[in-house]
Image (spheres, rainbow, N blue to C red):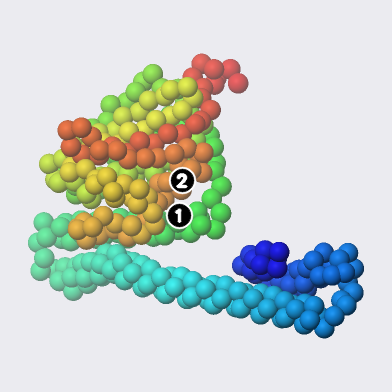
Amino acid sequence: MALILLMSVSILAMLFDILPVLIASLLSALIWNFFFIPPTLTFHIDNAEDLLMFLLYFFIALVNAVLTFKIRKEEKKARDKEEKENTIKLYNTLLNSLSHELRTPISTIIGAVDTLRENKEKISEPNQNELLDQISIASLRLNRQVENLLNMSRLETGMLKLNLDWCDTNELISSVIQKLSLTHKQKIIFEPNESLPLFKLDSLVIEQVLQNLLHNAIHYTPPNAEITILTNSIAGIFFIYVSDTGSGIPIHEQPLLFDKFYRLPHSKTGGSGLGLSIVKGFIEAHNGKVNVENNTHGGATFVVQIPAETSYLNNLKNE
């Protein structure tokens, strides 16, 4: 019984702070005395041998409790130190990545503007147009990175508030495709699904989701690849399928794909690893989900599922 009581104190020491553990040690000694040291059912101890045994038990229980508590405390310190080191490592990785992603377009813009300002009279019109195109592309890239940082901040601080309204998803997707930079060589295919109802969504958020999915597909597929967007509606759930004809995604990498700052190994430069994590956060804010799967004939498909209130145009007019 003494060993069972000591084990109980050790278990409590692994779960609670020192004060409850010390109280448990005292109570375990009193319980042992009351029930198992003659005369039983009383706290009185008749002989010196039993008294010494009681005091030794109480001392061992206290030492056991304190040592167990200190071991747990040291383990917590070690875990906190490891987490701090991992956080610093992640921060440095993020800082290096973002500094490159932000500095590159800024340098391009500054260099092109300085060239135009200092040599405007000497540069031919085609070269001027090329410099202006570089400024435009770099500005869009810079704007995309800043938007990703702001969106991630909104998600992590809980500041994202959805503005739900009736949305024509065909028009929304067509608008996103038109806003894409024309520098990509991949072919984007989208055939509007005219049978779809109107969905109550936050159109700006869904637009950002589509932009990130398309930029991700463009970034990780060869120039001759095709990117296809399909939509569907089943039982009040809006489906978006973004497929490509690239090389696909390794199975063991798929669970990590939506983690913050994660990028596939050996991927080409560019990107901060925030795009897909923002997609996941925005979709989950709509109570939906997103996953990825490899296609049978190569490439990958991102599947977005969003439960949403629906209404056909005739019903909407009658509201």
Q: Amino acid at mark 2?
A: Phe
- SS for dot 1: helix
Q: Which residue is mark 1?
A: 151
The reply to whether residue 217 is in sight is yes
- SS for dot 2: helix
Q: Amino acid at mark 1?
A: Asn
Residue drawn at (33%, 57%) of the image: 262
Q: Nearer the viewer, residue 158 or 46?
A: 46
Q: Nearer the viewer, residue 123 or 285?
A: 285
Q: Nearer the viewer, residue 177 or 287?
A: 287
Residue drawn at (46%, 34%) of the image: 306
Question: Quarter of the image containing the N terminus?
Answer: bottom right
Residue drawn at (20%, 32%) of the image: 296
Where residue 187 appears, x then y in whole percent?
18, 38
Q: Which residue is mark 2?
A: 282
Judged by depth in the image, the label closer to the viewer, 2 or 1, is: 2
> Would you call the spot at circle 2 few (<14 residues within 10 Å), some (14-19), or many (20 or more)?
many
Where residue 100 appears, x then y in whole percent?
28, 68
> Would you call the spot at circle 1 few (<14 residues within 10 Å), some (14-19), or many (20 or more)?
many
